[in-house]
Amino acid sequence: MQPNTIKSRHLQIVHYPNPLLKKIAQPITEITSDIVELAERMTFMMEESNGIGLAAPQVGISLRLVVISITGKQEDARILINPVLSDLQGVSESEEGCLSLPGVYGNVKRAASCSVTAQDIDGNSFMLDAVDLAATVAQHEVDHLDGKLFIDRLSTLQHIKCRRSIKQLEKEY
Ligand code: ZN
């Protein structure tokens, strides 16, 4: 991604099965004003779309940047640059949805808690411990950076349950 290519770009949420969602996103090596603007716009788009997390590949930008807000509000949003998960513990299963898969909901098993190491918008490294919903969202969003969607993690039974709505998205694409 070249500098100055984000600012001029119209961002919109890309839907499955857009191949951009399958790509492994690139690390951010320098937090330019472009990156700051991208993070701000993504935070706004997340709240506008009633999401609690959004990853840059979901707006068509293949970079390792996610925003998370478990209240869905912009003021509670955390910006995570180059996030890395560690210390995944326990198992919890909860129903997930995704702004890139409108109308698709399924139960996904993930670690019940995890740590996330990332950089903030000023480039400072920090670590946060996430449990329950925050842990689910962190794992869901970091998956996006590795080209994975929650439907890739569904059990066969859950996948069958979602098949019709997934097929619908494939038809609309
Ligand atoms: Zn998602």
Image (tube, grey):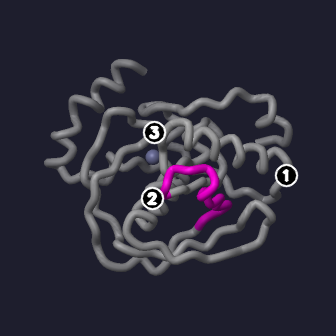
- For label 3, the residue is 99
For badge 2, the amino acid type reads: Val
Quarter-of-image position of residue 97: top left
Some atom of ligand 1 lies within 8 Å of the CB belonging to the residue at label 1: no
Mark 3 or mark 1, which is nearer to you?
Answer: 3
Q: Looking at the picture, how far across and down is residue 3, in whole percent?
A: 85, 42
Q: Residue furthest left?
A: 157
Q: How far apart, in angstroms, are the residues tagged by discs 3 and 2?
A: 12 Å
- For label 2, the residue is 137
Q: Looking at the picture, how far across and down is residue 71, in whole percent?
A: 49, 55
**What quarter of the picture does the C terminus occupy?**
top left
Q: Residues within 10 Å of mark 1 (few under 14, many from 20)?
A: some
**Is 23 rendered above or below residue 80?**
above
- Residue located at (31% from left, 54% from top): 153
**Is 83 rendered above or below residue 164?**
below
Q: Marks 3 and 1: CB-CB under 8 Å?
A: no
- Residue located at (73% from left, 56% from top): 28
Some atom of ligand 1 lies within 8 Å of the CB belonging to the residue at label 3: yes
Q: Residues within 10 Å of mark 2 (few under 14, many from 20)?
A: many
Q: How far apart, in angstroms, are the residues tagged by discs 1 and 2?
A: 26 Å
Residue 32 marker: 1
Please report the bounds of the magenta region as a residue range.
70-83
For badge 1, the amino acid type reads: Thr
Quarter-of-image position of residue 167: top left
Q: Looking at the picture, how far across and down is residue 75, in whole percent?
A: 63, 54
Q: Is residue 72 magenta?
A: yes
Q: Is 39 on the left or on the right of 168, as rendered?
A: right
The residue closer to the viewer here, 162 or 136, is: 136
Q: Is residue 121 magenta?
A: no
Q: Is 4 on the left or on the right of 94, as rendered?
A: right
